[in-house]
Image: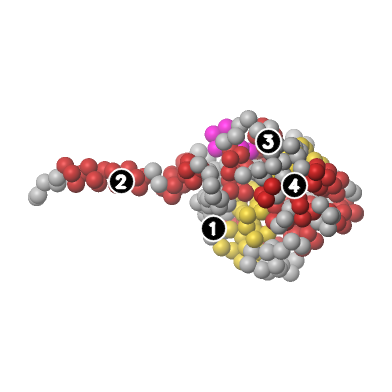
Amino acid sequence: MPRLSPLFLLSLSVALTAYMLSPTIQSIFTTVAAKLAGYTSNYADLATIKKPRMPVYFFSHGGPDVMYNKSHPVYPTLQHIGAEITSLRPAAVLVFSAHWQSRTPASILVNSAPSAPLIYDFSGFPLHYYSATYPNIGSPALSARVCTLVASHDIPCDTTERGLDHGVWAGFHVAFHPDENPLGVPIVQASLFRSEDPDAHYRLGRAVSALRDEGVVIIGAGMSVHNLHHMDSGPEPLPYAVSFDDALKEAVEAGVDERQEKMAQVCSRPDAKQAHPWMDHLMPVHVAAGAAGDDLGKQLWTMKEGSFAWAQYRFGPLPES
């Protein structure tokens, strides 16, 4: 048998090292590690265990830098909210992110991947941002359940397999840190409509609200104010960031019988297109409010900063322990 040359062995070693350190392989290993650490993807089993009704949340998720900028005031805020959610011991999390719209204004898509790689849907950040990892598992059973529910409300729905965008994994890395506060249950992402229709998104939330009684925490992930055109304006909040964030709080915290109308009216304010030139980051709060049903909304925290605002909301009371 011929001997392999040292040069060949060195080249093979370098190639294997590069392959093992690639983000794709890292994602595979983190998923395996998550499962070994006790994650369970069997939502169907967990949902049969009687649980109290779960609250609904809206995260202002920030950019991919949110998971690295520990000095920003939103970092401990998301940590606190994340600890609150994991203390509820949910069966799963269903999340609607600003960064995934369906193909049409009247249908949605639901991710049915057993585990999801990360989508690095941003540009201009340091290289290490593009090798970030977040261990997660999905639930085809929950994905199918979501589609069944929305279809029963005359909303066409298809399942697909995709990764998690940074509207999910960046904020979740803070709220549900893999080492400090692991979520430990499936994450299923559903799309928004390809529209800026607040009432349609409110109805979408209402269609999935039954999941709350099955132990599922529903989270909308966006921003209460989000204008990238003015992001270099500095930390002093721009006037529209203040006025729109305040108006959104008033609408979200309105009585249930008038909340949907007041939240829709917010989208027609004179400052609305300044606060949200495209309303993809606002629609998730309408989904969350719809999923809340007859439960009231409460602002947990906010911060106006330049052309952004970071309001965090919870709908519904915390279950009694």
Determine if the magenta segment contains residue 179: yes
Q: Is residue 201 left or right of residue 9?
A: right
Q: Which residues are magenta?
A: 174-181
How far apart, in angstroms, are the residues tagged by discs 4 and 2? 45 Å
Rendered location of residue 272, percent (x, y): 79, 54
Q: Where residue 224 is drawn, which disc sits there?
A: 4
Give whichever of discs 2 and 3 has the lower sequence position: 2
Q: Nearer the viewer, mark 1 or mark 4?
A: 4
Can residue 238 be spotted in the picture?
A: yes
Name the residue carrying label 1: 162
Q: Amino acid at mark 2?
A: Leu
Task: Check whether the beta carbons of the residues at disc 3 and disc 1 lie within 8 A of each other.
Answer: no
Q: Where residue 280 is drawn, which disc sits there?
A: none
How far apart, in angstroms, are the residues tagged by discs 1 and 4? 26 Å
Determine if the magenta segment contains residue 261: no
- Measuring 72% from the left and 55% from the top, which residue is drawn there? 277
Relative to 245, residue 161 above or below = below
Rendered location of residue 307, percent (x, y): 72, 44
Q: Is residue 118 left or right of residue 146?
A: left
Q: Is residue 1 left or right of residue 37?
A: left
Q: How many marks?
A: 4
Q: Nearer the viewer, mark 3 or mark 1?
A: 3
Tag 4's secondary structure?
loop
Other residues around mark 1 within 10 Å, as few (<14) / some (14–19) / many (≥20): some
How far apart, in angstroms, are the residues tagged by discs 2 and 3? 40 Å
How far apart, in angstroms, are the residues tagged by discs 3 and 1? 28 Å
Tag 3's secondary structure?
helix
How far apart, in angstroms, are the residues tagged by discs 2 and 1? 27 Å
- Measuring 64% from the left and 48% from the top, which residue is drawn there? 93
Name the residue carrying label 3: 74
Q: Where residue 16 is drawn, which disc sits there?
A: 2
Quarter holding the C terminus is top right
